[in-house]
Image (spheres, rainbow, N blue to C red):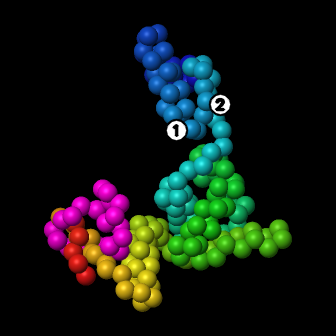
Amino acid sequence: MREFVLRHLPEIGPASQAKVLQSLTNSFTQLGVATGDGTRLRFQIHSGTLAGFLYVLTAEFSRPGMYSFGELESGPMRRWLLWDREWIRRQLYNLQDLGIVSKVSEIDTIRQFTIGLDQAAALERFFTYPIERMLRGILLLKAKMTIPTFLLKDSSGFGIAAAPAAALTYPGCYGKNDLLKM
């Protein structure tokens, strides 16, 4: 690590060098990406976040199409980010549940996935899906039984999401002024 720091910061003094090495070690350790002792970092396979995975996946596979797991596992995402293979596989299924990945297929030795959206559409779908799912769930509940429902509004008064009245029983979940009776 010391050689790396000196190669990129040749004018740095010994005291600053020690601080930089400690900062690098602390950063990677706190992120759960590596362990270190100040002289060496040992990187390890780890999990990421679904949002991060989606962003990198759609950047690496920018066009809708069918791709093999091999392309995914040997590509920059896996090599540079050190994401666990099983975790990556589970995230593909999670994205399939959200309608971003059209299909994940694992038949014998043929493993592939199909992305149905470009990056902009995939990210939009991902970040709007929780609200859509919550609204659909509330509409289904209302169809089965009568539940008082409230509409969440933003600071401009625009309705942005719905919540069942039961959500009001959890302190701090929603502010009194954030709800409108539907």
The residue shown at (57%, 19%) is: 38
Magenta highlight on residue 144: no
The residue shown at (64%, 58%) is: 88
Question: Please, is residue 47 above or below residue 105 in the view?
Answer: above
Lower position in the chain sequence, tag 1 or tag 2: 1
Left or right for 165, reference 86: left
Closer to us: 86 or 2: 86
For label 1, the SS is loop
Left or right for 23, reference 90: left
Kind of residue sitting beneath label 2: Arg
Per the rendered image, the range of residues in magenta is 156-177
Q: Which residue is mark 2?
A: 42
The answer to which quarter of the image holds residue 135 is bottom left
Please identify the quadrant where the C terminus is shown: bottom left
Kind of residue sitting beneath label 1: Leu
Residue at the farthest right position: 108
Question: Please, is residue 152 above or below residue 30 in the view?
Answer: below
Marking on residue 31: 1
* CA gap, disc 1 and disc 2: 13 Å
Pinpoint residue 159: horizontal percent, then vertical percent: 24, 75
Residue at the farthest bottom position: 143
